[in-house]
Image: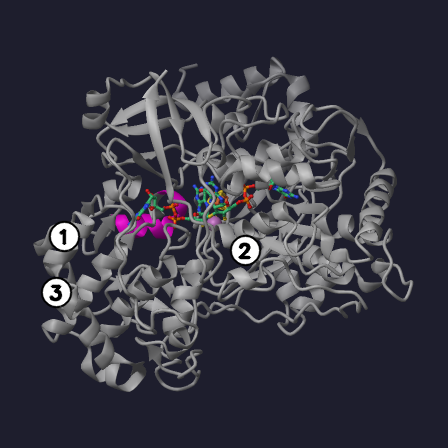
Amino acid sequence: MSITRRNFLKGTAAGLGCLGMSSIAGFRYVSKAHAKELAEQQVKYVASSCAICTNKCVFRGQVVNGVIRRLEPHPEFAKSRGMMCARGNAGAWTPYDPNRVKYPMIRTGKRGEGKWKKASWDEAYAYIAEKTNKVVEEEGGHRSCIGFASSEGTYHEHYWNQFREVFGSPNSVRHTTLCLSSNIRGFMAVVGTYPNADVINSPFIILAGANRAESFYTPDTMDIFSDPTKKVICLDPRFTKTAAKATKWYPIKPGTDMAFALAMMNVIIGEGLHDKAYVDKYAYGFNQLAQHVKQYTPEWAEKETDIPAQGIRDIAREFARTPGAVFYPGRRSSFQGDDVETRRAIAMVNVIVGSFDRKGGLIPNVTIPLAKYFYEPAWYSKTRPRLEEADVTFLSPRDGSWVAWRDRAIKGDPYAIRGLYIYKQNVVASVPDRNKTMELFDKLDIIVCVDTFMSDTAWYADVVLPESNYLERLDPPNTYGLNCVELPTVTIRQPLIQPMYDTRSGFDIVVGLAKYFEDDDGATLDEYFEGDVESHTRDAVAEFPGAFETLKEKAFFSEGKASPIGDYLNGKKAINTPTKKLELYSDDFESRGLDPMPTYKRPADIGADKFRFVVGRHAIHTQSMTANFPELNWHMPENTVWINSAKAKTMGIKSGDMVQLKNRTGGEVQIKAQVTEGIRPDCVYYANGYGSLSKGQPLVYGKGASQSQILESHFEPISGNALMHETIVEIRRV
Ligand SMILES: Nc1nc2c(c(=O)[nH]1)N[C@H]1C(S)=C(S)[C@@H](COP(=O)(O)OP(=O)(O)OC[C@H]3O[C@@H](n4cnc5c(=O)[nH]c(N)nc54)[C@H](O)[C@@H]3O)O[C@H]1N2
Ligand SMILES: Nc1nc2c(c(=O)[nH]1)N[C@H]1C(S)=C(S)[C@@H](COP(=O)(O)OP(=O)(O)OC[C@H]3O[C@@H](n4cnc5c(=O)[nH]c(N)nc54)[C@H](O)[C@@H]3O)O[C@H]1N2
Ligand code: SF4
Ligand SMILES: [Mo]
């Protein structure tokens, strides 16, 4: 018999069979025992959304025999489109991290000593209630003496706020005032909303103080940089990934973006390049603005910003002449003292060229309207206004102002704060000036922290309540504009696996705690909570047939309709400003004693041989919460401080040298130097998340330096936003 290839293959297969080997898709040669194991494997897929950053990318989680194997990006989800970043992938392992908080814990040693006793939920709640009721009684029955801190992200945060309201404290401090309050306020004042930039359709984008290539590390961002027809201008004191990908990078002097924006308007209006018809029809105060910006020439701005006058002129002309050009609104904006005014100036640059509510420009953020989660507020005979009410012009009652509030709380002005309940916020790391946060903690009788990990904040708490991991729980729907894809979408989270330890979801934690408190009429506070997360989800989307089923199947729901553009211009929607126009001049600001138009004030001189400390995103980390993830830590075991190479040379500093940074208010850190040309000589930077105080984060405990330890405490008085770039440091080699 002649052996043909076909016979040979047949023979081989038969031979394999005889040897007890089999060939299953993906597994070529495996033992019989393993083949049986594989055949019996239970593989299931559950769709859910990522919780490792604000993007909420949707994935299908592969679960094999009850163990999460991998998270596969959902190809149909418009923002992630088959991509999942390093952080999202690393998330798959978080339920199995040995450093999770696995059960409620009550502190037994001194704060920060790390001595705990394991408690049942009821023990933990009873302990919290006893301590809380005691201090409330000592304060004359005012529950305002308990503060509440929280951040978004789990979709459960509104239950936490509901608890605070029915509990009867006005004192809530949310992450917004550490993030983008000043940005929102600035844009609201001019265009009546905080818009997105239509970057997909825009041919000309100015990114000032926004590091999109690291902070929105998703395909829509890659589209911006891979499209050769787009022009991207990046203004950043650091050579970020965004700077590297941009058409042009200008290492702007920090805190001078307003000078740049004002000079752009000087050129655009001075040369008559503005959109006259648009401005006539939709804007208020154009003539005053035109007069006002005459003083701000590019030559003047060059001295302020370090950007050549000709460069400013060229950018301004091209910006005005390119339909669909956009000056990106940025997100986190807590830079320097005049942040609201800087954001107003940026919004105005967009308005004078007619970019608001037009394709390519600033697009109103539209969301799918979910049925509102409604609850009766409790009524108390004793209430007080929140602490920092007098310190901030536009104080959001829900967000407060973290820094201003903390200053008041430390002083007990106008009344004492005795406890802090914290939900999903690592306040020790995310509020500038860690020493001050510790000073506040020292004054508190009770600190409660709801976290999944032993963050620095959990480490210093009296009671740690563990929330179930995002891959173990059901999260209610979240509706958002999918910024920059402009596709209003609803997402949920659902469990891939059952909770591994004695943990609960945010909703269940809150309802459990509510049982331990009463309102003025003697009703326990859990009576204010109804249903469960599943029923809330069903109710929220009841108006959209099939949406609930789609959410269960895909974890996202979209009507497939892009955000409408032009509704404000065609009169379908009213512009949400006092004059119902796009405000280039604000009577409202003027009546409050503020500048009616953005007026430049030069940032204070930092002094010779001093540095401005700036913060910024890192592509593989989210804030303070991922540096202890082993997969990510492996890429970056510690952080290092960026120092300009020419400057470092004069100081005799080389990469790897240990240096000491000292701020003006007693904050100091030691960290290794990274000498680089990618930062201005007057700035320094290092990444967030390192230098942890918590031994429950062993990979970053004492490794590198913490940002909150070096950041000074300052806030912006119009919005209450913390200022992240008002820290001046000295550096010396140690
Ligand atoms: N130094 C410094 N401070 C900053 C910033 C900075 O760049 N540098 N940026 C500012 C900005 S823009 C923002 S938005 C804020 C963000 O500040 P935070 O909202 O405090 O964010 P993170 O630092 O990420 O801390 C999140 C905490 O939530 C915990 N966590 C994670 N998942 C869950 C969960 O499912 N449930 C619960 N209960 N907890 C969970 C994490 O373990 C971590 O302790 O920080 C601001 N502060
Ligand atoms: N990978 C990753 N992505 C994230 C997050 C994360 O932690 N990690 N966090 C999310 C959150 S909460 C937010 S708010 C967004 C924030 O995302 P972005 O708005 O992109 O904010 P940053 O990355 O802080 O970028 C700000 C940049 O401004 C530069 N800068 C400093 N001072 C000045 C100045 O005066 N002028 C100018 N023009 N530039 C200046 C800094 O060097 C920094 O690169 O990112 C989100 N996405
Ligand atoms: S960008 Fe990365 S971390 Fe953020 S939601 Fe998407 S996958 Fe998760
Ligand atoms: Mo943020």
| 2 or 1: tag closer to the N-terminus | 1
Residue drawn at x 45%, y 64% is 487
Say if 641 sits above or below 212 in the image.
above
Q: Tag on residue 317?
A: 3
Say if 707 sits above or below 177 in the image.
above
In front: label 2 or label 3: 2
| Residue type for callout 1 | Glu
Judging from the image, what secondary structure is the residue with disc 2 in? Answer: loop
| 1 or 3: tag closer to the N-terminus | 1
User: Magenta span has 368?
Assistant: no
Mark 2 vs mark 1, CA separation in Å: 34 Å
Say if 8 sits above or below 243 in the image.
above
| Residue type for callout 3 | Arg
Say if 62 sits above or below 382 in the image.
above
Q: Is residue 325 visible?
A: yes
Q: Is mark 3 within 8 Å of ligand 2?
A: no
Kindly identify which residue carries mark 2: 401
Judging from the image, what secondary structure is the residue with disc 1 in? Answer: helix
Task: Please state if 502 lies on the left or on the right of 633 as rendered.
Answer: right
| Residue type for callout 2 | Ser
Q: Tag on residue 195?
A: none
Residue 713 in the image: x percent, y percent? 47, 44
What segment carries the magenta color? 214-225
Which SS type dominates the magenta stretch?
A: helix
Residue 605 in the image: x percent, y percent? 26, 44
Q: Is residue 468 visible?
A: no
Kindly identify which residue carries mark 1: 302
Mark 1 vs mark 3, CA separation in Å: 16 Å
Residue 1 in the image: x percent, y percent? 43, 14
